Image (cartoon, helix red, strand yellow):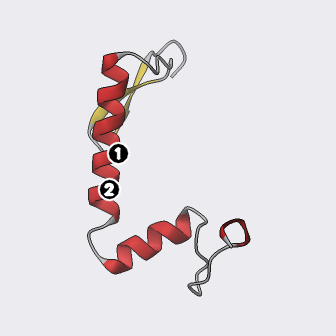
């Protein structure tokens, strides 16, 4: 990806900037779409939601909060 200003995010099917312009309207809209897609994807079921929380390090596999969140 050397020299590439954009790459393709397959999860939300949208280009994402590799050079961060965080306050541009395009970046805000990209973030909004990505956040919405993540929310929809990660709340489809209780099992999927738990898996995401474990992957993000919020809960352990046994269902307890990790040390950072106690």
Where is residue 45, by image quadrant?
A: bottom left
Are the residues tagged 1 and 2 within 8 Å (C-beta)? yes
Q: Which residue is mark 2?
A: 39
Q: Is residue 62 above or below residue 53?
A: below
The percent position of residue 23, horizontal first and vertical second, equals 43, 18
Q: Which residue is painted at 28% across and 33% down in the image?
A: 14
x 58%, y 68%: residue: 58
Q: CA distance from mark 1 to mark 2?
A: 6 Å
The residue tagged with tag 1: helix, strand or loop?
Answer: helix
Give whichever of 28, 34 is nearer the camera. Answer: 28
Point 38% across, 15% down: residue: 24
In terms of secondary structure, where does tag 2 sit?
helix
Q: Nearer the viewer, residue 40 or 4?
A: 40
Q: Residue at x 49, y 23 (%)?
A: 18
Residue 35 - label: 1
Q: Nearer the viewer, residue 36 or 3?
A: 36
Quadrant in the rendering for residue 12: top left
How far across and how far down the image is residue 33, in percent?
28, 39
């Amino acid at each position: 990806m050397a020299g590439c200003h954009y790459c393709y995010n397959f999860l939300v099917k949208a280009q994402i900037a590799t050079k961060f312009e965080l306050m541009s309207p395009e970046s805000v809209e990209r973030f909004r779409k990505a956040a919405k897609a993540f929310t929809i994807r990660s709340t489809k079921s209780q099992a999927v939601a738990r898996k995401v929380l474990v992957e993000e390090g919020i809960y352990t596999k046994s269902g307890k909060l990790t040390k950072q969140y106690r």
